[in-house]
Structure formats: structure tokens, C-alpha cells
Image (spheres, rainbow, N blue to C red):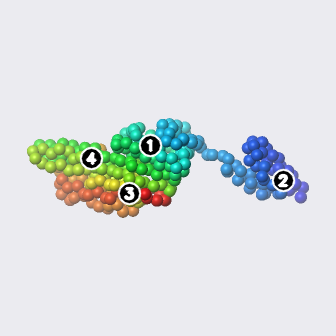
Amino acid sequence: MLVLSVFSTLFRRCIEGLNQVFKGGAQNFHLKTGIPTLVLIIAQFSSVFVYGTSYTITCNNVSGLISAINTANGNGTDDTIILASSCTYNFTAINNYVYGPNALPEIKSKITIQGNGATLYRNTTTKFRFFFVDTNGTLILDDLTLKNGAIIGGTGGTGIQTSAGGGGGAGMGGAIFNKGNLTASNVTFNSNAVNGGTGGAGTAGSSYYTGGGGGGGIYGSGGAGGWTTSNAGGGGGGGGFSGSGGTGGGWGANGNAGASIGGGGGGAGTTTSGTRTGGSGANNGGNGGPGQWCGVEVTQTGTNG
């Protein structure tokens, strides 16, 4: 009993100290024995301490969100960005051109974005996606909508002599291009789109071929795909370039300049990597899939808007 009394006394003093530190946060604890008190202290610590650095972004403060991501990329810790509840963040400008135009800085570290029902919305005619996740980056999205992102592939090369122009490059990732690690929980991908680039001009009356689209919502570099219903895909793969997610759309920024190599086929829109193949002859590109996530490694739960 003496041991238990001393044990309880020590934790009572600890609780009293916590009352001073947290200004009343622990005064509702009722000390009877040492063991329940220890459990309560652990619970109190769990609710108070935040691991890494957190940033709270006010409603529609796009510049603040950009600044928070830049800081998170360089501070060497895991970071959490908290968006305003049910707010729409309107994006009107391109931030960078890593694998195409992006509205936000590329993700180079581990960043969690708690959406609280917020929406990231491309509110302009300028085409860009929202996120590019670098190979060393980890992006965790929760309770968020990505709406109206759009990407178009590069223009194909001009035909040589009497050859047809090359197929346009594939547009990849209307909302997110992922080369790293991505987790999306309760995330809606709404009205994002990709389109293949314009085919290169032919010569001497020859024709040209359009490019491809990979992943209306998300494009990635391999692994199992996800699903979405409201994101549009484009045509066949970029001229002369095959994708790395099954036989999905091409990676190339521009199509092949000659006519001897056909474009790779776009993804078939299944829940795994693409299976639709390109044409077997020269100048033939395969058709694109219906805007599914084309070969992306992603953990996803939630809705498709």
C-alpha cells in the first residue's frame, strides 16, 4: 500500500503540473490509483502534441497554400496543411512546369493536406493540374475535392519529306501526376480532363495523328489503378512513346517526327493498369481509355464526383 500511495502521489503532482502547463486541460482527471492516471496522461499528451509542423490556411488563400508547401519541402520534417472547412480555393495561374503545368509546387517531402471538405478549383481557361508528386515525395490527401484540372499534351513533330507528322504527346494527370507516394482518403476528383496534343503537320499531302491522354484524374508510373467517373480522357498514346503503366498512354512531351512508329495505346480504363493496345502497323495509334486513373500507385477511399 505504501508503494501505491507514493506512486499515486507522484502522478498527482504530475497532473498538477500539467494543469499549469495546459491551463486547466487536465483538471477533470480524478486520481484514484496510479495506473488509470498514467492512461489519462498518455491520452492528454496524444491530444496536445502535433508531430511535425502544421499550417492552417485561411479560405481561398492560394498564395498561403503555395508558401506552406514550399516551406514543408525544405524543413526536413513531416508536415500537415489544414484547409478551411468547406471553402473553395480558386486557382488561376501556373506555378511550375514539372512534367507539365502545375498549380502548386511539386511535392518533395511528406505532406498531409487535411481538406475539411474544401475544394481546389481551376477557375481559369489556362490549363494545369494541381499536384505533381516527386519520386521522393509523399502526398496524403484527406476530405478534399479536386475540380476542373486540365492538361493537354505537346504538339507532334512535323513530318519529313512525304511522311506524316508525329502524334501529339500524351496529356498526363488532369488533377495529379504521381511519381512518388500518394494516399487519397475521402477525395473526390470532379471534372478533371486530359487531352492529347495536336499531331504534327504532314508533308506533301500526308496526314497527321493526334496524341493521347493518360489519367483524367491521376496519372502515375505503375502499379494498380483506381477509379473515377467524371474525368475525361483523350485519344491514343503519344506518338512513338509507350507508357510505363501497362500499355498506357505515352510519356513523351512530343510525338515522333516520322511515320514509321505508331503511338502507344491509351489505358483501357480498368481498375488495374491499362490493357488496350495500339495499332499494329506504322502510323497507327491506339485509342485512349475513358478517363480512368491510368496505372497509378495509390491508396484511395471515398467518392467519385
Question: Would you call the spot at circle 3 few (<14 residues within 10 Å), some (14-19), or many (20 or more)?
Answer: many
- Quadrant, the N terminus: bottom right
Q: Position of residue 191 (x, y in %)?
A: 38, 53
Eyeballing the image, is 153 above or below 230?
above
Q: Position of residue 98 (x, y in %)?
A: 38, 41
Q: Secondary structure at mark 3?
A: loop
Q: Is residue 28 left or right of residue 118?
A: right
Q: Secondary structure at mark 2?
A: helix
Question: Would you call the spot at circle 2 few (<14 residues within 10 Å), some (14-19), or many (20 or more)?
Answer: many
Going from N to C along the chain, the mark reached first, 3 or 4, is 4
> Does the CB distance between marks 3 and 4 fall below 8 Å?
no
Which residue is under mark 2? Answer: 8
Front position among marks 2 and 3: 3
Q: Quadrant of residue 32?
A: bottom right
Going from N to C along the chain, the mark reached first, 2 or 3, is 2
Front position among marks 3 and 4: 3
Q: Quadrant of residue 204?
A: top left
> Does the CB distance between marks 1 and 4 fall below 8 Å?
no
Q: Which mark is residue 230?
A: 3
Q: Is residue 276 left or right of residue 27?
A: left
Which residue is under mark 4? Answer: 197
Q: Secondary structure at mark 1?
A: strand
Which residue is under mark 1? Answer: 90
Residue 134 visible, this angle? no
Residue name at image x 37 percent, y 39 percent: 97
Going from N to C along the chain, the mark reached first, 4 or 2, is 2
Q: Residue furthest right?
A: 2
Going from N to C along the chain, the mark reached first, 1 or 4, is 1
Name the residue type under label 1. Answer: Asn
